[in-house]
Image (cartoon, helix red, strand yellow):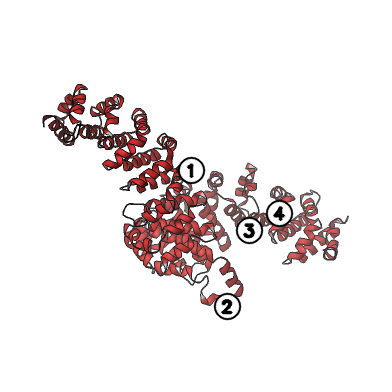
Amino acid sequence: LQEVTASSRHYVDRLFDLDPQKVLQGVIDMKNAVIGNNKQKANLIVLGAVPRLLYLLQQETSSTELRTECAVVLGSLAMGTENNVKSLLDCHIIPALLQGLLSPDLKFIEACLRCLRTIFISPVTPEDLLYTDATVISHLMALLSRSRYTQEYICQIFSHCCKGPDHQTILFNHGAVQNIAHLLVSTSYKVRMQALKCFSVLAFENPQVSMTLVNVSVDGELLPQIFVKMLQRDKPIEMQLTSAKCLTSMCRAGAIRTDDPCIVLKTLPCLVRMCSKDRLLEERVEGAETLAYLIETDVELQRMASITDHLIVMLADYFKYPSSVSAITDIKRLDHDLKHAHELRQAAFKLYASLGANDEDIRKKIIETENMMDRIVNGLSESSIKVRLAAVRCLHSLSRSVQQLRTSFQDHAVWKPLMKVLQNAPNEILVVASSTLCNLLLEFSPSKEPILESGAIELLCSLTQSENLALRVNGIWALMNMAFQAEQKIKSDILRGLSTEQLFQLLSDSDVNVLMKTLGLLRNLLSTRPHIDYIMSTHGKQIMQAVTLILEGEHNIEVKEQTLCILANIADGTTAKELIMTNDDILQKIKYYMSHSNAKLQLAAMFCISNLIWNEEEGSQERQDKLRDMGIVDILHKLSQSSDPNLCDKAKTALQQYLA
């Protein structure tokens, strides 16, 4: 290092010369020495050139020419490695350059902007540095009119520093849409392209921006029409892709209808074209991911995409070779593509997930694509978390198909890798994986048995204790599916795994979804007589407490109805009935709901009564007498006159039990 730096030292020494002319010449020589020479850049940073260059750049006494050359050299140093950028940031280069933008000299402003652009597009630069001073954004907006270079660099800075809704709102409120729109028809391709990129990040998942864009016009032409022109096949690929992203965001935000010709005939076919194997890897990735987002929630677009250019088969190539054979002449390209091949797999899984989200025929086509199930199974254990997440999403999408659950999922024992994924995955994967597990546990799915044997109950019970709401819902939902028409041992295992404490926790959860699924679980546990009697003999006291708790609480009709149905199931037990008959509090509640204003609740309460007074069962006489004394028969008479045919029939049937 000593020898290397010695040869560079004279460059730095000259920056301290007393003669301003020699300093200027020194900076110009330094500029020529560092262009394209990363070693030289690193040496000069080590030797402390940066603080001196920044000092000269900020000195009022420096000539404009000197200040401009300093900005150019700093920009060149920033073009090197990420470490170079870190060193520049440590010397507080950003405030110095932003200060420079206040100069009246255009050439100096452009040099500062070019350097800022280079620093902001580096992944090591925090975007928030652009937003620390509120006046910066409005000053940048004002500079947009100065030259095509200020336009290009400022748009590039905005599109790189706009991450998330907060940034979008700041730029939007500072008039980004109005200030940037006319740049889409600039004579400079670079300016048009950077303006387009700005709109694609401003509109992403942002309804406010999207709704505004629809109505903006430039030279009498609306923005969507301008975007459509930029989609045409004769335009450069990056322009086609970026305008497709703008239109996609506007469509997802509801600013453009999904059946609008600009989506159906222009955007969708353009994105499908990007998936073809003669496109570059990053184009194929971006094309597939954008298309997945465009069609994610619309079944018609899913059907349309699935029959465009053999897309389903075309995506199978994403798993084979990262570059097309013709591109392999470039060895650097091949190396790059092999390192990034996992991005292709992720994009393909995402797009398959969107394609198969709703339509049974499309799912069948996807699964019949060569080795598809094996690819998903492999994807579940890849090292890249993004690929794992996308593979689980794809599996979840396909698991909505009853037919596939019975066939392909069974043939490939998909549940095994899925259970493995559930062992210690981050939450975003857990949510999708547990949703998939819910589907695999439906009663018609042959995977149900082996999943149970592999310790699923424990796993799902632990999910119900998660801080994350979606995981609690999925955990209890999967247990509910598992308990449906299950044998007694499984039901007991679930109750043991959950513990009474946890059951009460779930029944007092603030989320109504958790509550409904927990009641659904209880209802499934308490079905078929022997099971009802057995479970009530071991957990009767707690379950009756839970039922009382809910019937007394402030809950919606659906929750109360589900709870009364659980009581009706208990009333259907042989010995379990007694737990209701000896509980006057519960009997009064059933009576109250028989006269409720809501017919659903009245009907559910009547089921309880019918099950309690059924004639052929032991002790029915005593039960009938007790309920008559409570005034139940009077209510039945009243209900037998009801205008609601269901209530009327049910009441008449119950009264017949008294006459028999």
The residue where tag 4 is placed is 86
| Disc 1 to disc 3: CB gap under 8 Å | no
Q: Which of 591 and 286 is in front in this view?
A: 591
Between tags 1 and 2, which lies in front? 1
Q: Which amino acid does label 1 sit on?
A: Asn
Mark 4–mark 1 distance (CA, rounded to whole Å): 37 Å
Mark 1–mark 2 distance (CA, rounded to whole Å): 50 Å
Q: Nearer the viewer, residue 294 or 410?
A: 410
| Disc 2 to disc 4: CB gap under 8 Å | no
Query: How packed is label 2: few (under 14 Cα within 10 Å), some, or many (20 or more)?
Result: few
The residue where tag 3 is placed is 149
Residue 369 placement (x, y as % from top left): 39, 68
Which is more N-terminal, label 3 or label 4?
Answer: 4
Q: Which amino acid does label 2 sit on?
A: Thr
The residue where tag 1 is placed is 468
Indicate left or right for 76 with 210 as reference: right
Which is more N-terminal, label 1 or label 4?
Answer: 4
Q: Nearer the viewer, residue 363 or 300?
A: 363
| Disc 1 to disc 2: CB gap under 8 Å | no
The residue where tag 2 is placed is 329
Residue 44: mark in rendering: none
Which is more N-terminal, label 3 or label 1?
Answer: 3
Which is more N-terminal, label 2 or label 1?
Answer: 2
Q: Which of 176 and 327 is in front in this view?
A: 327
Q: Which amino acid does label 4 sit on?
A: Lys
Residue 223 placement (x, y as % from top left): 46, 55
Residue 653 placement (x, y as % from top left): 14, 34
Mark 1–mark 3 distance (CA, rounded to whole Å): 48 Å
Could you tell me which residue is drawn at 52 percent across and 61 percent down?
382
Quadrant of the drawing holding the C terminus: top left
